[in-house]
Image: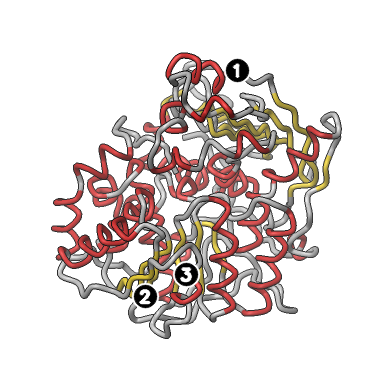
Amino acid sequence: MSAPREDGITRREWLTGAATAAAALAASPVQVLASTPDWRVDLFAPTPAGNGSMLGVPFEKHAVVRVAIVGTGLRGRSVLRELLAIEGVEITALADIAPEKAQLAVDMITKAGRKAPPVYTNGERDFLRLVQQNDIDFVYTATPWQWHTPVMLAAMKAGKHCGSEVPISLTTDEAWELVETSEKTKRHCLMMENCCYGNSELTVLRMVREGVFGTLLHAEAAYLHDLRKLLFENKDEGLWRRFPHTERDTNFYPTHGLGPVAQYLGIHRGDKFEYVVSMSSPEAGLSEWREQHEPKDSPKWRETYKAGDLNTSLIKTAKGRTILLQHDVVNPRPYSRLNNLQGSKAVFNDYPPRLYIDGAPGGERFTPLSEFKSKYEHPLWTAVGELARKNGGHGGMDFIMAYRLVQCMREGQAPDFDVYDAAAWSVPYALCEQSIRKGSAPIKFPDFTRGAWRTSTAPQGPATSTP
C-alpha cells in the first residue's frame, strides 16, 4: 500500500517520524469502545446464508486478540504500530525472510513495553511453522503479492483467522481456493482494504445508507499514483513490485478504488459484479523513466514491459449499474482513486471531495463534502477519528481499519467484509487480463457466493431530505 496520507506526508516520512509517538501511544493503548449496529462499515449486515457459507458469520469472542504478522517490511511495521496502539492486542509471532527487518519489528514491540515474540526467519516458507503456534487468533500478511494466497491458506488450514494486504489473490483459481478453504475451515479470510475506512468513503457510505443518493446508477474507482521512483528503487517494494509489469497486461491493483465502491453499491448484499470489459493504453512510462534515470549497464535494461500504462475497464453489475475502473502507476499525475458515485438524486466526486444534491440552494454547483460531515460523518470517525488522524497512517484510515478488526473480534461480531468480497475485489487482476487478450471481450465474474448475494440483503434507510 503506497498511498500518501491526506496531509501529503509519504508513508516513508510517516514511518520515520512516528516511531516515538507510536511507542508512547502503545504504552497507553487506546480503549476499544462498545459498538452499535451503526458502526458497521458495509452497506448493511449480510444475512447469514448457512450451508457452509461465511456470509454474516461472527468471530468468536476474544478477550485478547493475539496477532501474528508475516512480512515486517515497511507496510508490516506500519500495521504493527496501529495494532500496538489498541487495547486488548498481543503480537505473538513474526516472520520475514530478512532477519534485520524482523528485528526492527521486535524492537518496536519491546520499546512499547511488550514481550518479544518468537521470530521466524528461516527462508520464505517459514510462515508454515509460524501458523502452527497455538497462541495465535489472527494472521496478518504484508508480503509481496504472490505470497498473499499461500500465507492465507496456511493460516486457515492451521485453524487461524487471517487477513491480507491487497490484492489477496492474483488468479481466479487462487480466489476460489481461498473461498473454499474459508468455508471448509470456518475461518475468516479478509482482505484488509484500508481505503474502505477512509473518512470520505465512510461519510458517503452513510449518505447512501440514508437514501441521499436515491437510486444508485454509476460509480468510478481507480488507483492513479505516480510510483515510478519507487518501482525502480533497489530496496523494499522496488525489489519486486516492478516485475508484474514485465509479465502481464492488466489492472494490477484494483481494490483500493473498487472496495469502497462495492460497499456503496451493496455488492454481495443484493447485487454482484456481472462482467468486465478491459483495455490498456500503450506502454511508455517505465521505459521513459528507465531511459532518463538508469545507467546503461543496469540489469533493468534487460526488462521488457508488457503492461500498458493506463488500464481502463468497465464493470456491469447484476442490477445493471456500471463502474469505471482504472489503474496507472507509471505516469506523472496527482494521486487519485476517483471515488465517484452517481445517483438519481445526488452525485459525489472525490479529489477534492465534493457533492451536489438535486435542488440544493445555489444552483448546479458542488458543495465541499466537509459541509455535510456534522450530519453524516460515520460513527467510527466521530468516536476515534481524532486519535486516528494523530496516530494512524494514510490520514487515519489505517488506524480505523485495525481498530475495527479488533473491535469485531473482541465483541464476537461478523467482519465488515469477508472472503467473498476479498475474492471479488481482487479477481479483476485476472479478468481484465483475459478481456484484453480477447480484444476487450466481456468476461464474466465468478459468483463466489454461489447465489447467496441475492438473499443477503436488507432495506436501505428512508430517503433523506436535502440537507
Amino acid bearing label 1: Ala
Q: Which mark is residue 65?
A: 2
Say what secondary structure mark 3 lies in. helix
- Badge 2: few (under 14), some or many (20 or more) residues near its Cα, within 10 Å? many
Say what secondary structure mark 1 lies in. loop
Amino acid bearing label 3: Phe
Between marks 2 and 1 in the image, the one whose residue lies nearer the viewer: 1
- Gap between marks 3 and 1, in whole Å? 38 Å
Residue drawn at (47%, 55%), measured in percent from left and top? 143
Looking at the picture, how far across and down is residue 394, in whole percent? 36, 42
Q: Which mark is residue 187?
A: none
Residue found at the far front of this picture = 297
Residue drawn at (86%, 34%), measured in percent from left and top? 438
* Whether residue 253 is situated above or below residue 232 in the rendered picture: below
Mark with earlier residue (2, 1): 2
User: Residue 209 or 235: which is nearer the viewer?
Assistant: 235
Q: Which residue is mark 1?
A: 284
- Badge 1: few (under 14), some or many (20 or more) residues near its Cα, within 10 Å? some
- Gap between marks 2 and 1, in whole Å? 47 Å
Amino acid bearing label 2: Val
Q: Which mark is residue 127?
A: 3
User: Residue 360 or 13: which is nearer the viewer?
Assistant: 13
Looking at the picture, how far across and down is residue 88, in whole percent? 29, 74
Looking at the picture, how far across and down is residue 265, in whole percent? 65, 46
Residue drawn at (62%, 63%), measured in percent from left and top? 419
* Whether residue 360 is situated above or below residue 175 in the rendered picture: above
